[in-house]
Image (cartoon, rainbow, N blue to C red):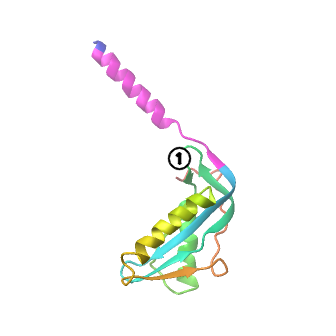
Amino acid sequence: MRYIRYTFFIMMMAFAVSTVNAKPVVAPKGYMFGFIANFSDSVVYLTDIQTVDNVWYDHKTKFLMGRSAYSNQLREYFANTLNQPHRTCIVVFALTRKEIEKKYLKLKKQYTGKYAGRYDVRTLNENEFHFTPIDTSEDDEY
């Protein structure tokens, strides 16, 4: 009987912990860059590191809110401006400049270091493409 109570108590605690979500928080500014690839093509693109104002993120996990909307901005830019649909677009986010530069260099090194001859790495500067802030204060998207 004690085992059943103990198991029930543990299950209830696990349920209570899993239902508690951290509230989204807005940062006055955040840093992000984009990575764009088509895995049937050897050309990959990296955007410059950009400062974006009023970025919403999960305070507990430091995870960018509305990340799919930011990657859709990249996808639409490639489909409409460069006429290159069907690209895989990801957005990398950090709260500090030092942290985002570390992530940027790590990703760039993966495509220019060991595999330098296999990929044609191109960069998009901020004049060509710029992320626009997205308000996700009422959205529940993670």
Q: Give the mark count.
A: 1
Q: Nearer the viewer, residue 29 or 56?
A: 29
> Which quadrant of the figure has residue 21?
top right
| Residue occupying the point 28% across, 17% down | 3
| Residue occupying the point 54% across, 68% down | 71
Q: Nearer the viewer, residue 124 or 4?
A: 124
> Which quadrant of the figure has residue 124?
bottom right
Residue 7, visible in the rendered structure: yes
How crowded pointer 1 is (Cα within 10 Å; few <14, some 14-19, many 20+) is rated as few
Q: Nearer the viewer, residue 35 or 104?
A: 104
Disc 1 residue type?
Thr
Query: For this view, does 61 lie left or right of residue 11?
Result: right
Residue that badge 1 annotates: 61
Query: Is residue 11 found inside the magenta-colored segment of the image?
Result: yes
> Which quadrant of the figure has residue 12?
top left
Determine whether 52 is above or below 142 in the image: below
User: Which residues lie in the magenta part?
Assistant: 3-25
Q: Nearer the viewer, residue 118 or 129?
A: 118
Tell me where residue 9 appears, x and y as whole percent. 39, 21
